[in-house]
Amino acid sequence: MTKPMAAITLRTLAACAMLAGTTAALAHVTLPPGGATVGSDYNAAFRVGHACEGAKATTGLAVRLPKGFVLSDAQARKGWKLDVTKSGDGEVRWTAETPGNALPGSERSEFVLRGKVPATPGTLWFKVLQTCDTGVADWAEVPASGNSTAGLKSPAARLVVVAQGVATVDVRDGWVRQSVPGQSGTGAFMKLTAPTGTKLVSISTPAAGTAEVHEMKMEGDVMKMRELPGGLDLPAGQTVELKPGGYHVMMMDLKGALAKGATVPMTLKFEDAKGVKTALDVTLPVGAPEGADAAGSSAHQHKH
């Protein structure tokens, strides 16, 4: 059955946003991985990685709310003053009451506010001013176009708002092992993070007749691989890695050789504890990225 083009486009855009670079992950004030469904309530937990450059502690954090985000409340912190400004698009500000209450640069913490996201898909950029004992860091850069924060020195915190039916799962570091002519199977790998918890229940790709989530483990002195019954659980907020020698996507009945540098489209389908089904379209590069563990190159020769 042919998928509606609009659905494919929305899922692909969401996937591109969630797969776009790693710069945001290296920024020092970020939101957790994963997106939010249109019109839903969202807990924005801003993660502070360390103090401003040359500083020893964070003494304040001011979050400027993007247009379309409707604030419901903000979480107080012991020893910090909380101020909420509702004029304009709004701002939430936390300020340490004494130097002793400041957040040391060696520690990480979250500053949490809650609100409702817009009823239409898109990207929300939360600009955050971090004040320290010495200087400030303004995480406010937004790309001129698109969602990628690659190349931005001080990117704003990004939240991707997706349409109904599109999974909010964050997909990172995905790749497919290359294959040679006549090879029947290969593996695909990635890191998955679900903000509210769900289960990866199926995978499909035009590059293979069948794609399943498998697990590799030692049984005695033999490495065996089996399909996971019922799918792969993704606990809320926890990153689950599909990698060589462990959980992975097994692609069987390949339609052709997969050369390094090519790409493979793939649809991931999920189902949460309430039975709500969502899907996400991703495109994975063929070939292990630099530094990846590419062990298990003969994984397609599996034993059951």
Image (cartoon, rainbow, N blue to C red):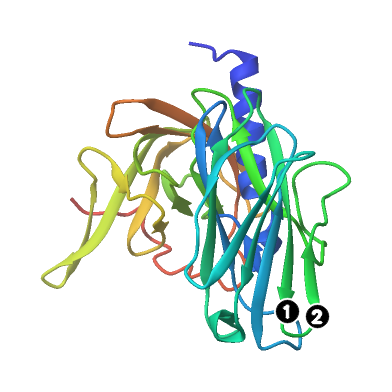
Q: Quadrant of residue 59?
A: bottom right
Nearer the observer, 7 or 196: 196
Image side of residue 246 versus residue 52, left or right: left
Tell which circle, 2 or 1, labels the residue nearer the N-terminal end.
Answer: 1
Query: Do callouts 2 and 1 mark residues in contact (Cβ within 8 Å)?
Result: yes
Q: Nearer the viewer, mark 2 or mark 1?
A: 2
- Is residue 27 visible in this depiction of the protein? no
Q: Position of residue 201 (x, y in %)?
A: 33, 35
Residue at 22% from the left image edge and 63% from the top image edge: 217
**Residue plotted at (36% across, 58% down):** 299
Percent from the top left, x then y, of residue 112? 53, 55
Kindly identify the residue that appears in the image at 64 percent across and 16 percent down. Answer: 5
Kindly identify which numbered label has been placed on residue 52.
Answer: 1
**Total numbered labels placed on residues in the image:** 2
Percent position (x, y) of residue 263?
Answer: 64, 44
* Amino acid type assigned to the residue bearing label 2 in the image: Gly
Whether 253 is drawn above or below 113: the answer is: above
Task: Inspect this view and state whether residue 91 appears.
Answer: yes
- Vertical placement of residue 256 versus 98, above or below: above
The residue that label 2 is drawn on is 135
SS class, disc 1: loop
Residue at 66 percent across and 43 percent down: it is 17
Relative depth, front residue between 228 and 253: 228
Which of the 4 quarters of the picture holds residue 229? Answer: top left
